[in-house]
Amino acid sequence: MAKEFEKAGLPTVIVTALAPLAKRTGANRIVAGVAMSYPCGDPFLPSSEEGELRRRIVETAFEALQTPVEGPTIFTPNFKWSGVLPPSHPSQGGPGGATESRNA
Amino acid sequence: VGEIRIVHYLNQFFSGVGGEEKADMPPASQNRPLGPGIALQESVKGKGKVVGTVSCGDNYFNHNVEKAREEVFGLISSFDPEIVIAGPAFDSGRYGLACAHVCLTVNERLNIPVVSGMHPDNPGVELCRSKTYVAVTKASVAGMREAISTMATLALRLAKGIEIGSPEEEGYIARGIYRNVIVDKCGGERAVEMLLKKIRGEPFTTELRMPVLEQVTPPPPIKDMRNVMVALVTEGGIVPKGNPDRLEWGHSTKWLKYNIAATDRFTEGDFIVVEGSSKNQFTDADPNRTLPLDTVRELERAGRFKKLSDHYYVTVGNVTAVENCRRYGSEIAEELLTLGVQAVILTAT
């Protein structure tokens, strides 16, 4: 869908935990999200920290929309997540399985 | 007598009518080979006969696809063909798309062999290759002779019911069909052999080609977000409570939109998540975790961008056909452009 939006000339940012997959399928502006089922949140953080995490993700999405790119590019928000994986998805907690805070 | 009846489809240029200035030419037919059809006739001599040529301007076809399909099909079927050959179109996009539409239409309605020829980058390839044979051609007309020969061979074999070999052997574009074959070595042995060859830098042929995905040129970045209307789109299945339009949990067949002009955030209970690849307890509790409406509204209020579109757009990407996603994307894009949206935030689960 991202590619169809871009074909129509709409700058598009896709937020997903499966950033490498999005890159391989050819989406051009990609923001690495938190987890597969909740790219923009972290239920294991206190709500104020979760709010901050979401703000950083959305800020990174805005940054991606304003950045010139040549081809598929991953933007990694600088956020701190709980490191807790959802029980139903033991291996899908964030890109690259990172467990510490990640830097842009 | 006994020769297979072949009808050949060409554009305005190859049928000899004219170049770009004649690209609006409506469909026409003649009861003899024209242009590349003469080489085609030569190539099938004694086995087949080009009984008719149907031609149409590339612009006419692409500007009135449904109409052109009907008109061209009418002319083709009037020759009572046993084989239809379209092109070759080489890397010409409009011609390739026209050939693909012709092949698909004939394939659907007449159940006779249809073959076209295109360069693998021609956009017509994706349209028809899974249903009809497309011979691989060079990018330019310099590859005419080989193209005609490959197309004629394929078509005659199909007409006689002779089994078609692999894409590499026969020179057509892979249709994405897997066939069982009997081989000497088990998969493990073959995989290790390939790996060793790869490590040694020797050539090897993979048995599972990864799909080559279309690349899209990224649109230029937004200069100033403060002047921009943004839309939120998700394939994460957020819908109003009760799922009133019955969005599927997977294998989705539609996209939907819901008005959020007066909604500051997705609240628990008012919106639910129907996406079916994982448990939705965390996103049901706070759907903003999938589509960050709350944060985006804050930024809107702070004047960071001009306006959020009145609706958000939603489908389910879980085990949904790529072709459907493409359609959702282009349909939603059309609506967004009409509304004046200039940037999209899409979330995927």
Image: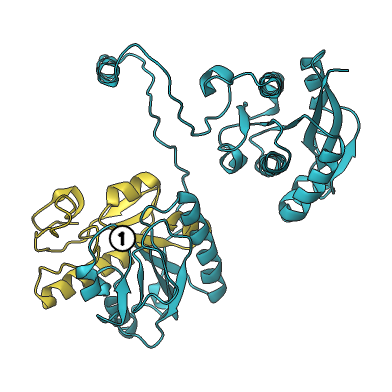
Chain colours: A yellow, B cyan
Find disc 1 in the rendering and name its residue: B276
Residue at (26, 82) in percent of width and height = B267
In screen coordinates, is B165 left or right of A75? right
In screen coordinates, is B69 left or right of A25? right
Residue B198 seen by the camera: yes
In screen coordinates, is B1 left or right of A8? right
Q: Numbered disc 1: what chain?
A: B
Q: Most extreme residue toward the bottom, as rendered?
A: B262
Q: Residue B140's spot in the image, x, y percent?
A: 66, 29
Query: Image quadrant of residue B101?
Result: top right
Q: In this orientation, which residue lies closer to the viewer: A19 or B300?
A: A19
Q: Residue B83's spot in the image, x, y percent?
A: 75, 29
Which quarter of the image is occupied by the N terminus of chain B?
top right
Residue A66 seen by the camera: no
Which quarter of the image is occupied by the C terminus of chain B?
bottom left
Q: The residue under label 1 is which amino acid type?
A: Gly
Q: What SS does tag 1 mark?
A: loop
Q: Residue A50's spot in the image, x, y percent?
A: 15, 72
Q: Most extreme residue toward the right, as rendered?
A: B31
Residue at (39, 73) in percent of width and height = B225
The total of numbered circles placed on residues is: 1
B308 shown above or below B52: below
Q: How dense is the environment of label 1, judged by Cα within 10 Å: few (below 14), some, or many (20 and up)?
A: some
Q: Residue B154's spot in the image, x, y percent?
A: 66, 22
Residue at (82, 39) in percent of width and height = B76
A74 shown above or below B291: above
Residue at (80, 45) in percent of width and height = B72
In screen coordinates, is B167 left or right of A13? right
